[in-house]
């Protein structure tokens, strides 16, 4: 793969997210016909180099550009998306919302669920369920969007607040936060070799 293909991919993904098939199709329209398996390896390599964000939205993986200021570190959405897979499907939406809202200290925009690996159907099904703890935010999207530069928010974008949560949601959320913390700091020399520590120890 040449640098020109990377520049084409960069151009294709500006302002949007695409699956592997979507990127392959767009490249073909630009005269670059690569096999899907080749593109899979290339996109994942760019993800490993932190040039692209990768979010799993079953059954596909979706890619987007890493903002310049995010290039040297993983963003909160990728961290949550990576760890939310271990949560029972019934609790993925409220746990993702709770973890993000507590981290950024504000309600969650609808777009952010996609970035955290939550598909549209999963979100819609949860919002219509009797167990839903999310509710429309009291203020408008425009008011919450003030000062937010890493998201393109319009005044009509839905935004959700997390209401009262139960013990199970809190337990799953704490586990996700601990996983993110453990993966973000060097704990070498702090954990005894004789102890096999698991997240259940913190439940």
Image (cartoon, rainbow, N blue to C red):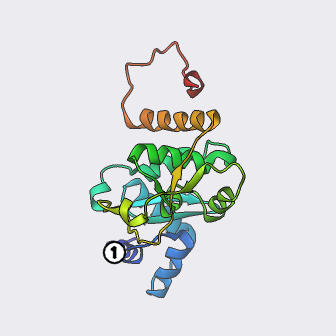
Viewer-proximal residue among 163 and 47: 163
- Taking 48 as reference, is 10 above or below it? below
Viewer-proximal residue among 103 and 62: 103
Q: Quadrant of the C terminus?
A: top right
Q: In this figure, which residue is indicated by the disc labeled 1? A: 7
For residue 181, side relative to residue 146 (left or right): right
Q: Which residue occupies 42% across, 71% down?
A: 155
Q: Position of residue 21 (x, y in %)?
A: 56, 73
Viewer-proximal residue among 147 and 35: 147
Q: Position of residue 170 (x, y in %)?
A: 57, 35
Count of labels shown? Answer: 1
| Label 1 CA crowd tier, 10 Å (few <14, some 14–19, many 20+) | few
Q: Position of residue 60 (x, y in %)?
A: 60, 64
For residue 123, side relative to residue 151 (left or right): right
Q: Residue furthest right?
A: 130
- Taking 52 as reference, is 75 above or below it? above
- Looking at the rendered structure, the secondary structure element under dot 1 is helix
Q: Which residue occupies 28% across, 61% down?
A: 68
Q: Residue furthest front?
A: 138
Q: Which residue occupies 27% across, 57% down?
A: 69
For residue 114, side relative to residue 102 (left or right): right
Q: Quadrant of the N terminus?
A: bottom left
Q: Which residue occupies 40% across, 68% down?
A: 153
- Taking 42 as reference, is 188 above or below it? above
Viewer-proximal residue among 121 and 20: 121
Q: Position of residue 186 (x, y in %)?
A: 36, 30
- Taking 181 as reference, is 80 above or below it? below
Q: Residue furthest top?
A: 194
């Amino acid at each position: 793969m040449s640098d020109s293909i990377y520049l084409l991919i960069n151009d294709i993904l500006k302002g949007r997210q695409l699956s592997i098939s979507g990127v392959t199709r767009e490249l073909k329209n630009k005269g670059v016909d690569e096999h899907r398996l080749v593109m899979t390896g290339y996109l994942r390599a760019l993800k490993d180099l932190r040039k692209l964000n990768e979010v799993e939205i079953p059954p596909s993986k979706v890619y987007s550009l890493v903002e310049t200021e995010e290039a040297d570190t993983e963003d909160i959405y990728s961290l949550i998306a990576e760890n939310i897979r271990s949560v029972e499907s019934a609790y993925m939406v409220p746990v993702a919302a709770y973890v993000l809202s507590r981290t950024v200290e504000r309600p969650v925009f609808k777009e952010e669920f996609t970035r955290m690996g939550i598909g549209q159907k999963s979100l819609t099904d949860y919002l219509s369920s009797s167990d839903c703890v999310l509710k429309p935010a009291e203020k408008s999207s425009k008011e919450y969007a003030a000062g937010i530069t890493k998201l393109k928010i319009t005044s009509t974008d839905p935004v959700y607040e997390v209401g009262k949560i139960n013990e199970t949601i809190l337990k799953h959320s704490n586990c996700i936060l601990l996983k993110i913390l453990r993966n973000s700091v060097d704990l070498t020399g702090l954990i005894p070799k004789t102890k096999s520590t698991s997240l259940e120890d913190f439940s």
